[in-house]
Image (cartoon, rainbow, N blue to C red):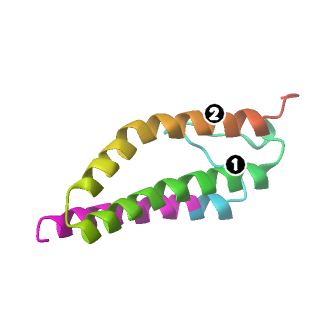
Amino acid sequence: MEATIPLAVILFICAIVFICIGIYALKKKTPMHFWSGTIVKTEEISDIKAYNKANGIMWIIYGLIFIISAIISLIFDSNIGGIISAISATLGLFILVIVYRRIYNKYENKDY
């Protein structure tokens, strides 16, 4: 149990960060960006509110995966939560990119 507590704490901290990003995206009035150092212009997006909602949900779900990993790790007192979080931190990043591209393409202003 002592080995799983630090893992669970770290996973909860990561989850809080991702969920906060999601909440920020939900409340943002201008388009939420995904890539570091880039800005999504208002003219690029056809429905900013729906675009930000989709971005926010994406980040919140990603954060919830880390919470589930932490809970599983604590309940079963094993490293299974660490394995799940390692998979979500690696494979999950690729999935985030794919999901974001779909979100962007869905709400992209074709006239821009």
4 above or below 103?
A: below
Q: Is residue 24 left or right of residue 75?
A: right
Residue 13 quadrant: bottom left
Residue 37 visible to the viewer:
no
| Identity of the residue drawn at 56% across and 42% down | 34
Q: Which residue is mark 1?
A: 31
Residue 72 visible to the viewer:
yes
Where does the image place residue 14, in percent across and percent down from the top left?
36, 59
Q: Which residue appears farthest toward the right when viewing the image?
A: 111
The kind of residue on which mark 2 rests is Arg
Q: Which type of secondary structure does the marked residue at label 1 adopt? A: loop
Where does the image place residue 73, in percent across and percent down from the top left?
27, 63
The kind of residue on which mark 1 rests is Pro
Q: Is residue 61 left or right of residue 111?
A: left
Residue 72 quadrant: bottom left
Q: Residues within 10 Å of mark 1 (few under 14, many from 20)?
A: many
Numbered range of the magenta stretch: 1-22
Mark 1 or mark 2, earlier in chain = 1
| Identity of the residue drawn at 44% across and 56% down | 65
